[in-house]
Amino acid sequence: MGIEITIEQLNENVAVMRIKGAIDASNFIEVVDRARETYNNPARNLILDLSEVPSLSTTGQVAIHKIALIYSGVPQEVEANENPDFTHSSNARKHVKLLNPQPDVDKALEKAGLKLFFKVFTDLESAVGSF
């Protein structure tokens, strides 16, 4: 798995996190940590480019959920406790967008109910422009 992060500069920085390879138990911590680093150095908006992610395990779904909590501004200690009040925050929809999930990944996101919290885009320009 590889992760490449670029910053699109608008009124506010927008990070584009391109993940290459499956997101699963072997790498979900790395995915979350890289997103947290990007949030802290400062890009408070994130596009998760899933165009090169062939599969997303349930652990990968947890990674995306944790990224949503980070970008919602949830403190790390609250994030660890999975407080349900923060889990369904609309801030995730404002600050994290998904780009080009492959069919199997899209199906996994749909099945887990995660697509209710994220706008999904098919092109980078529209995703960046949505912030």
Image (tube, rainbow, N blue to C red):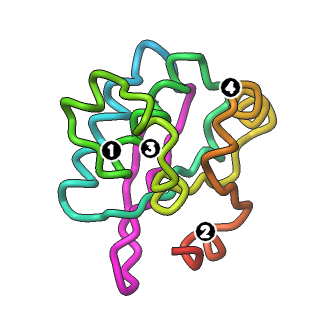
Tag 2 residue: 127
Tag 1 residue: 70
Distance in Å between CA atoms under marks 1 and 4: 19 Å
Tag 4 residue: 112
Q: Residues within 10 Å of mark 2 (few under 14, many from 20)?
A: many
> Closer to the observer: label 2 or label 4?
4
Q: Tag 4's secondary structure?
A: helix
Magenta residues (range): 1-22
Do the residues bearing badges 1 and 3 touch, measured as CB atoms within 8 Å?
A: yes
Instruction: Estimate the x, y position of residue 24 in percent, counting from the top left.
Output: 51, 18
Tag 3 residue: 68
Which badge, 1 or 4, is on the more N-terminal residue?
1
Q: Is residue 60 above or below residue 19?
A: above
Distance in Å between CA atoms under marks 1 and 3: 5 Å
Which badge, 2 or 3, is on the more N-terminal residue?
3
Do the residues bearing badges 2 and 4 touch, measured as CB atoms within 8 Å?
A: no
Do the residues bearing badges 2 and 3 touch, measured as CB atoms within 8 Å?
A: no
Q: Is residue 109 above or below residue 43?
A: above
Identify the residue at horizontal 52%, vertical 40% (top origin). 88
Quarter of the figure with residue 93: bottom right
